[in-house]
Image (tube, grey):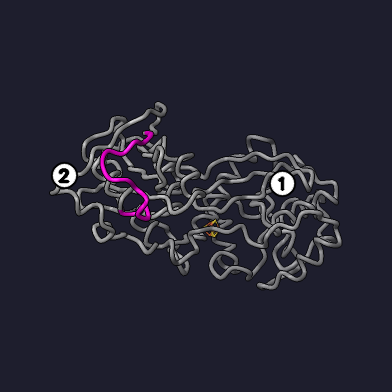
Amino acid sequence: MSKGVLLLSGGLDSSLAGLILRNMGVSLVALHLESPFGCDSMAEKMASEIGVPLVARPKGEGFLEILAKPKYGYGSAMNPCIDCRIHMFAMGKAFMEEVGASFLVTGEVLGQRPMSQKKRSIEAIDADSGMEGLVLRPLSAKLLPETLPEKKGIVDRSRLFGWAGRSRKPQMALARRLGLSVMPSPAGGCLLTDSHFKERVGDFVAIDWQEKGRKGASRLPVASLLRYGRHFRFDEGEWVIVGRDQSDNRHLEDHIRTSGVAFRPDGFDGPLVCILTTEREVSSRMGELATGALHAFGGGKVPSGPLNVTVLTGSGERPFILPPLTPDRSHLMKKDAWMPLWRQ
Ligand code: SF4
């Protein structure tokens, strides 16, 4: 088995790692592991650029378990980088068996990231994922022990690199030298490293979703919603998301149908209002929250009286009329009633 699996994030380093091996004639299959907290990935474009077939898989529910209780803890924000790498390598190992590969290739550079790319972390990650000696890191290989593909002569160690540290200059220079026509951003962009995102994710993982009537339901679609819109939680456990702009509205519409109900203004300007719920029918409480949010965040453009909206659920779209709020609920039309749980 002389084939390798390339863990391809779509960033510069993993793309280069793949290209270095392709230039040696090594057979590779790329595996892109999708995270609900990742930015838009260039994995597809980069796989085609370096000429490697690509398979994309979600990191899965298991990743959310890890996120809640990482064995090795968090980095500077909510990023469980060491556990995340172990999880990805374990998925890579299973994929290797599936495609008949004997080793894994990554774009890691020793010392580039403070948490997961120190020598000791790398050793722990390889050992915990059962991948000792099977992970080739072409950009730092000369600073690390020989791996199986080097020992077997599948890969020529003399053509690998010994880079360490945070500078990206060597990578950029090599990319130009190898004629990479697409230059991806250096890092993949993971929102878990963003301190503004920390509270949002922390609250998400702290919720007992089984108790909230989502027993057995996947939490991944909800996790995918965390990066869009303003989020509000009420004492009753209700969770409302209000789009901030057209881009938020578009993304929320794409994701909400598996996790809740959305209200889209019809014939007037206003935000998309989403309510996370397992219900498929609009309850009177949902209607109150939607009406309140439309007025509170509609920039003064929402008409008084009944509001025409389109309701979006997992079973389709339909027109709906939201009645005006009764006086004892009219406070919901003011922003003050909508204390964001998280910094927006
Ligand atoms: S930055 Fe994000 S994707 Fe990368 S190892 Fe850390 S948690 Fe995982």
Q: Quadrant of the N terminus?
A: top right
Q: Amino acid at mark 1?
A: Lys
Q: Is residue 332 left or right of residue 311?
A: left
Q: Nearer the viewer, residue 211 or 251?
A: 251
Left or right: 116 as drawn, with respect to 10: left
Look at the image and give the residue range highlighted in magenta.
296-310
Residue closer to the observer: 239 or 115: 239
Q: In the figure, residue 111 lies in which quadrant?
A: bottom right
Q: Residues within 10 Å of mark 1 (few under 14, many from 20)?
A: some
Residue 308 x, y percent position in the rendering? 34, 36
**Residue type indicated by callout 2:** Thr
Q: Is residue 305 magenta?
A: yes
Secondary element type, mark 2: loop
Element type at mark 1: helix
The residue that appears at 58% across and 56% down in the rendered structure is 126
* Numbered label attached to residue 143: none
Q: Please, is residue 226 above or below residue 27 in the view? A: below
Q: Which label sits in the foreground, 2 or 1?
A: 2
Identify the mark at residue 326; answer none if there is no mark: 2
Q: Residue 121: horizontal and vertical position, in percent?
A: 55, 65
Q: Is residue 258 magenta?
A: no
Q: Left of 58 or right of it: where is 157?
A: right
> Mark 1 highlights which residue?
45
Q: Which quarter holds ligand 1?
A: bottom right
At a point 70% along the width and 57% down the height, the residue shown is 184
